[in-house]
Image (cartoon, rainbow, N blue to C red):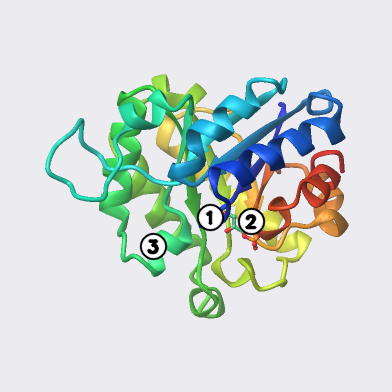
């Protein structure tokens, strides 16, 4: 399976900065990701169109939004619809990122609604899941992942499989510099694989990415793990130089 090398730019970069970063990335990578790898950038809404335009000069690359609202249109002040995202040239959206769960109060039901609506509107969805430090210490990793997966995927059929990716992002490893141990990553990824199999009733080729303090120094060890199909990178994706080292790791 190809490896997805995804960048989550969070609330960083104006459209001018996004264009400059992608142009630099493209130059450093010689216009395309290495064979078997694909670059995906989750840009802020205001830089989405600029990022998608810059990405058109890049092979094996696409752009996604970091959020959306599950409605066609309407009186939802401050929100963005799937059609608006697609009109910018983006083809992906994140759902369930821990910053939206924990800082903005999104729950599993709402995340599930977003995921289903995005798929219905032909966006590819990357569903983020992961436990907090307290949940991990209480031994609740399997319960938390099962709850997050079951509620988000409720009603999602196998037809959606080519448009779905998962990202395991332990909350305690995000932006902390503390990467999960390789054993922890393997354990969580195999739990996720079996939860996906249980939901769809068969082995599925849903890419499962790891995210949480991924950097040039640890990327190749993480990518070499059996059931890791890519990485979702925050801080280290903001500079073209460091993200290039990860993409080529
Ligand atoms: P960091 O790579 O900065 O830890 O962020 C990870 C993340 O949240 C990606 O979605």
* Among the 4 quarters of the image, the one containing residue 226: top right
Is 161 placed left or right of 187 in the picture? left
* Ligand 1 lies under 8 Å from the Cβ of mark 1: yes
Q: Looking at the rendering, in which quadrant would you find the C terminus?
A: top right
The residue to which callout 1 is attached is: 10
The residue to which callout 3 is attached is: 101
Q: Which secondary structure, mark 1?
A: loop
**Residue at the front extreme of this rendering:** 16
Nearer to us in this view, 233 or 240: 240
Q: Answer yes or no: do the residues labelled 3 and 1 have beta carbons within 8 Å?
A: no
Residue 35, relative to residue 96: is it above or below? above
* Among the 4 quarters of the image, the one containing residue 215: bottom right
Density class for disc 1 (Cα within 10 Å; few <14, some 14-19, many ≥20) is: some
Give me the disc on residue 234.
2
**What percent of the width, then of the height, locates residue 207?**
61, 35
**What percent of the width, then of the height, locates residue 203?**
56, 29
Mark 3 or mark 1, earlier in chain: 1
């Amino acid at each position: 399976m190809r490896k997805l090398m995804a960048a989550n730019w969070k609330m960083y970069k104006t459209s001018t900065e996004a264009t400059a970063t992608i142009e630099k990335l493209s130059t450093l990578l010689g216009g395309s990701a290495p064979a078997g790898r694909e670059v995906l950038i989750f840009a802020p809404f205001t830089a989405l169109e600029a990022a998608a335009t810059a990405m058109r000069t890049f092979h094996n690359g696409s752009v996604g939004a970091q959020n959306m609202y599950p409605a066609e249109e309407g009186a939802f002040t401050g929100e963005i619809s799937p059609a608006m995202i697609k009109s910018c040239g983006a083809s992906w959206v994140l759902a369930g990122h821990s910053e939206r769960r924990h800082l903005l109060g999104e729950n599993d039901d709402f995340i599930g609604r977003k995921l289903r609506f995005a798929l219905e509107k032909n966006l590819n969805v990357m569903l983020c899941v992961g436990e907090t430090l307290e949940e991990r210490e209480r031994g609740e990793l399997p319960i938390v992942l099962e709850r997050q997966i079951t509620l988000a995927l409720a009603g999602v059929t196998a037809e959606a499989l080519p448009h779905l990716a998962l990202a395991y992002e332990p909350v305690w490893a995000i932006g902390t510099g503390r990467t999960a141990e390789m054993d922890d990553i393997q354990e969580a990824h195999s739990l996720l694989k079996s939860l996906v199999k249980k939901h769809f009733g068969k082995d599925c080729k849903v890419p499962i990415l790891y995210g949480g303090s991924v950097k040039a120094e640890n990327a190749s060890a993480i990518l070499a793990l059996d059931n890791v199909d890519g990485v979702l990178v925050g801080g280290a994706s903001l500079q073209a130089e460091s993200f290039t080292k990860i993409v080529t790791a």
